[in-house]
Amino acid sequence: MNSHSPLHRRNFLRGLGAGIALPALHSLIPTRVLAEAAKAAEAGKAGLTASGMPLRMAFLYHPNGVNVDKWKPTGTGKEYQFNETQKPYAKFKNDFQIYSGFEHKNGTAGGDGGGDHARANASFLTGARPFKTAGADIKLGISADQVAANAIGDQTRFSSLELSCDGVRKSGVCDSGYSCAYQFNLSWRSDTTPMTPESNPRLVFERLFGSGSKDERAKSYQMRQQRQRSILDFVLEDAHSLEKQLGNNDRLKLDEYLTGVREIERRIEKAERFGPPADPGTPAPDGTPDDYEEHIHLMMDMLALAFETDSTRVASFLLAHDGSNRSFKDIGVAEGHHSLSHHQNDEEKLKKLAKIDLFYSRQFAYFLEKLSAKKDADGKSILHNSMIVWGGGLSDPNRHRHNELPIVLAGHAGGRFETGRHNDLGSDTPLSNLFLSMLDTMGVKETSFGDSTGFAQTI
């Protein structure tokens, strides 16, 4: 850095003194670092754009389908026209693509009977059919975000980030004999293990950056690392001493135990490699607000901060679970969302459903605004260097339709996507095809995902 640059004293020192995080200014990044990043991008390193910037991937889920007549755009290609409930994000037309024709067959009843809301949630990111159970024997499939996290998660402090505005439910019956685990979790590490989302914005902040003031967070980080190391050293020393006294069966059991210990050790080593978290330049939220829109905005703020600080490059956000019966009195809708979604073509119910769709579109517009305002070191916005899926697992909720899903793909993937289009696929196409293509764009080379039949033809 040039010590005579006005950035050096005014911004950099002020940032150190006041704990204000600097944006990713190109002039503050050593030429060597930029050259290495570009070289890694040219070599095809997963998780980077062509300019060497982080490539982010996020999936945002809104519940209970849409009023299709007020949502689906008219026309195709770049000359399409927005429908009524898409207008809040119309200003970002050149930053996204809208799709018609994606489906999830594994969301349909098949031979499993009722439970379309549970299947809508469960199949959305996995492309898999949930095993119908209310017990502990849940079974689904790994989700697209976790395939990406497994491939590039070692490049960031957190492999992935899971958010929700709902409470956590891992057991019990929620929809026609399906476990609540299917309905309240969007991300799945494996076919039996969901990734539990966090719904408290303050806890998300503290997970990303620590608790307390900037100095307190740094001190706490060092103490926590030392304590974890001390405990781990004690456990390993004790285990190795004990191993000499055990028979073969007990040694196998001990080895299984040590496998878990070694996983903790890897996490500690990863944390030490990245060092203490950067200061985000913003105070921690007070907690979970009562106002739903404010809650959504705070969670989106946390997600945008996570991307800006490169704390993670993979995220999912369940705004509300499918089947949610939340009311929206602030916009003049006193009835529950789920109740209205079974509108039976009643004109008044359809109008209220469109109001709720418009509310959710405003939330998407808020997030796009956030990402477009934040700049990467290449001068492009974080939105430019991202892939953001906005959608749900139902189209017409009255008939529980799992085809013609309302899907928007925002971001340019660092310049790899042709945006500003409405892509009508012409026939039912697995949504898993889109996810397979996104993984490929991320540099994660998979030949199939979920129920995919190939790569998406338009992206």
Image (spheres, rainbow, N blue to C red):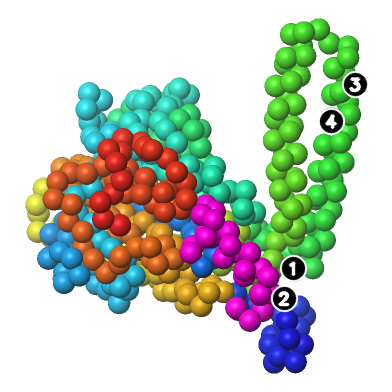
In front: 328, or 246? 246
Q: CA distance from mark 1 to mark 3?
A: 42 Å
Q: Nearer the viewer, mark 4 or mark 3?
A: 3
**Discs 1, 2 touching: Cβ within 8 Å:** yes
Residue type at mark 4: give it.
Val
Where is the C terminus found, in terms of image quarters?
Answer: bottom left
Label 4: element kind: helix
Q: Residues within 10 Å of mark 3 (few under 14, many from 20)?
A: few
- Magenta segment range? 26-50
Q: Earlier in the sequence, mark 4 or mark 2?
A: 2
Q: Residues within 10 Å of mark 1 (few under 14, many from 20)?
A: few
Residue at image point 73% right, 24% down: 257
- The disc label shown at residue 241, or none: 3
**Discs 1, 3 touching: Cβ within 8 Å:** no
- The residue labelled by disc 2 is 19
- The residue labelled by disc 1 is 213
Question: Is 125 on the left-hand or right-hand side of 239?
Answer: left
Q: Nearer the viewer, mark 1 or mark 3?
A: 3
- 261 versus 249 height, above or below: below
- The residue labelled by disc 4 is 235
